[in-house]
Amino acid sequence: MIAPVAVFGIGNRSRGDDALGPLLLDRMRDWLEARGVADGFELFEEYQLQLENALDLEGRELALFIDARRDSGSPVTLEAVSALEPASAGSSHVLVPGAVLCVYRRVTGRASPPAFALGVRAESFDLGEGPSAVARAAIEKAWELLESLAGDPRTESWQARVSTFR
């Protein structure tokens, strides 16, 4: 059985604040298992999004992409993601979430599941460093939001949360 919700934690654990996506994924995994709802979610840890990640959306009702964001004006952001042509989204080897949705549509001929991006403020991506003080503070705010999203995995609930970030 395919879990209805796909969650992508994007980043490199060895590059300072870039580890925020995977760190939140770890915390989410433990939270889901403790509540007995892990079967409703499939978690993917990725250094960067690739064309192949489009196939991970097959059969999903929702998708969430979690990533560190440099130069964010807010500790946490949440936005709906729309399909974006890969040519305008970067190279075919590194994709933004919208490009993954576009690839899904091209490959399957169907609309992608509703998707959202959770961004976490970051400032330092140095190799071998741990998360910065800014990132450690932001990850706590991000966890509060992620816990809320995971507790109510419905498109309309997530969309309502997006409107609070505008």
Image (cartoon, rainbow, N blue to C red):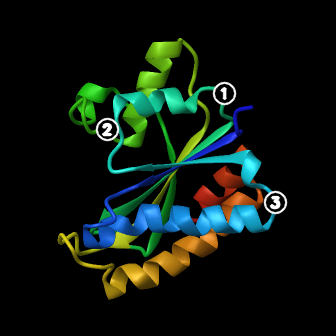
Q: Residue at x 57, y 22 (%)?
A: 111
In the picture as drawn, the residue positioned furthest to the top comes out as 109
Per the rendering, the mark at residue 29 is: none
**Residue 106 in the image: x percent, y percent?**
44, 15
Asked if residue 14 is positioned above or below residue 11 in the image, the reply reads below
Per the rendering, the mark at residue 59 is: 1
In the picture as drawn, the residue positioned furthest to the right comes out as 36
Q: Mark 1 is on which residue type?
A: Gly
Secondary structure found at label 1 = loop
Tell me, yes or no, whether the two marked residues, 2 and 1, touch with CB atoms within 8 Å: no
**Residue 69 in the image: x percent, y percent?**
34, 63
Q: Mark 2 is on which residue type?
A: Leu
**Residue 114 in the image: x percent, y percent?**
61, 37
Residue under label 3, please give it: 36
Per the rendering, the mark at residue 95 is: 2
Crowding near the residue tagged with mark 1, few <14, some 14–19, many ≥20 C-alpha atoms within 10 Å: some
Let me know if residue 149 appears in the view: yes
Of tags 3 and 2, which is closer to the observer?
A: 3
Q: Residue at x 48, y 23 (%)?
A: 104
Asked if residue 137 is positioned above or below residue 83 in the image, the reply reads below
